[in-house]
Image: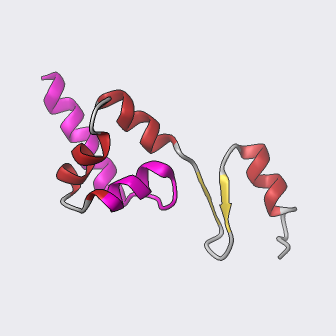
Amino acid sequence: MSALFGNPNTIARETGGQFRPGTDKIVRRKFGAVAKVLWPQNTDAHIATIAGVDVRTARRWMAGEFEPPISIVAAVLNETFRLQG
């Protein structure tokens, strides 16, 4: 598979992301890292509860296998501000 803008593996390596063939996205794994800072224990359970999904889905978001929907990112931010206030 080739891309018009260059070698997809090189692009992914240079940007620090992971290329997902067929989706044309560079997936970064920062969501999980941020969530682990906010909830160091049982992170996947916290994300699953906030998002209303099963723990397996939360783990996949945190691992960077799939991007979490923006509504989930917003819910995590909302929960973060609720915890601080």
Query: Is 58 included in the stretch rendered in magenta?
Result: yes
Question: Total number of numbered labels?
Answer: 0
Residue at the image position 28 percent from the left and 56 percent from the top:
55
Residue at the image position 36 percent from the left and 60 percent from the top:
69
> From what the image shows, is residue 31 above or below residue 80?
below
**In front of the other: 53 or 78:** 53
Residue at the image position 32 percent from the left and 29 percent from the top:
40
Instruction: Locate the C terminus and report the quarter of the image it occupies.
Output: top left
Where is residue 12 shown, x and y percent of the image? 74, 53
**In front of the other: 19 or 46:** 46
> From what the image shows, is residue 31 above or below residue 34?
below
- On screen, residue 38 versus residue 81, left or right, reads right
Instruction: Locate the N terminus and report the quarter of the image it occupies.
Output: bottom right
User: Toward which corner of the image does residue 3 lie, by quadrant?
Assistant: bottom right
Decide whether the magenta segment is chiefly helix, strand or loop. helix
User: Toward which corner of the image does residue 83 lie, by quadrant?
Assistant: top left
Residue at the image position 68 percent from the left and 71 percent from the top:
21
Query: Is 66 included in the stretch rendered in magenta?
Result: yes
What is the magenta range? 56-85
Where is residue 47 shown, x and y percent of the image? 27, 47
Q: Residue furthest top?
A: 84
